[in-house]
Amino acid sequence: MISLLPESVSSFAGEVDFLIVFIAVVVFAWLIAAEAILFYFCFKFKAKKGQKAQYITGENKSEMKWISIPHFAVLVFDIIILVMAINVWYQIKQELPEADETIGVVGYQWAWRFTHPGEDHKLGTEDDVETVDELRLKVGKTYHFKLQSADVIHSFSVPVFRLKQDAIPGRVITGWFKPTKVGQWDLQCAEMCGIGHGVMGARVFVESDDDHNKWLKNKRG
């Protein structure tokens, strides 16, 4: 079955999807309404045998309603969409829930380096585990990420999480996500970052606590 949107695998993916679908439905509805009215007027006021096409200036009060009413209706929907978008943006980009663990993410030309906390669940200690192009996460846990770039602007993007955050050289950007399903998915750079941009792909592995702990032990030797 073909899906219009990628699979939803994070706690906030549903809100993003709802916003996208809502905007698409509103815009499509207004498109159909506008085109239907346009064709109706084209046929209603077209030239007929013995009669020229009517030229409507829209200055009469009875005609102005066809401009003013749709105009104000569109503004109302614009305000609704703006409020909904700000709410989703705030939830994802501004509101930072308490983290179960924190990971480090660094973008390079052209690879991703991830730093995972070890058994002490703390980042920046001796038992951290580093990987390249392989991000390992526990299902149902809230993660903060510390995002950096080692060279140019990159963009940390996990489509199934509905997550995209630019990595800016010289800055450490904090964000969050909470994976909700076990599996493997693509992670990519969504910013043109040089000749190797197209091969800067990685994988996200979301696994159970037991499987993740086994992986940590194997990596630590």
Image (tube, rainbow, N blue to C red):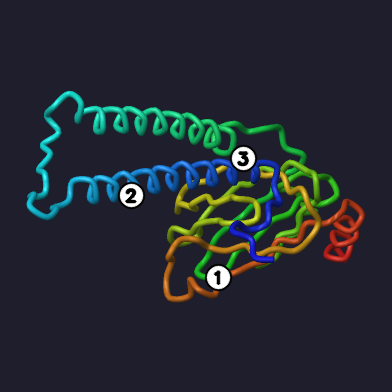
Q: Amino acid at mark 1?
A: Met
Q: Nearer the viewer, mark 1 or mark 2?
A: 2
Percent of width and height locating residue 66: 26, 33
Q: Which residue is mark 2?
A: 35
Q: Is residue 73 left or right of residue 185?
A: left
Which numbered marker is on residue 12? none
Q: Relative to the observer, which residue lies in front, 36 or 125?
A: 36
In the rendering, at what x and y percent does residue 52 appear?
Answer: 7, 50
> What's the CA distance linking mark 1 and mark 3?
28 Å
Q: Name the foreground residue: 214 vs 221.
A: 214
Q: Earlier in the sequence, mark 3 or mark 2?
A: 3
Q: Which residue is mark 1?
A: 200
Q: Dividing the image into 4 quarters, which one contains the N terminus?
A: bottom right
Dot 2, how many residues are within 10 Å of its Cα: few (below 14), some (14-19), or many (20+)? few
The residue that label 3 is drawn on is: 15
Task: Give the answer, above or below, for where 214 lies relative to 65.
Answer: below
Q: Nearer the viewer, mark 3 or mark 2?
A: 2
Query: Which quarter of the figure has residue 33?
Result: top left
Sequence order check, earlier mark of 1 and 3: 3
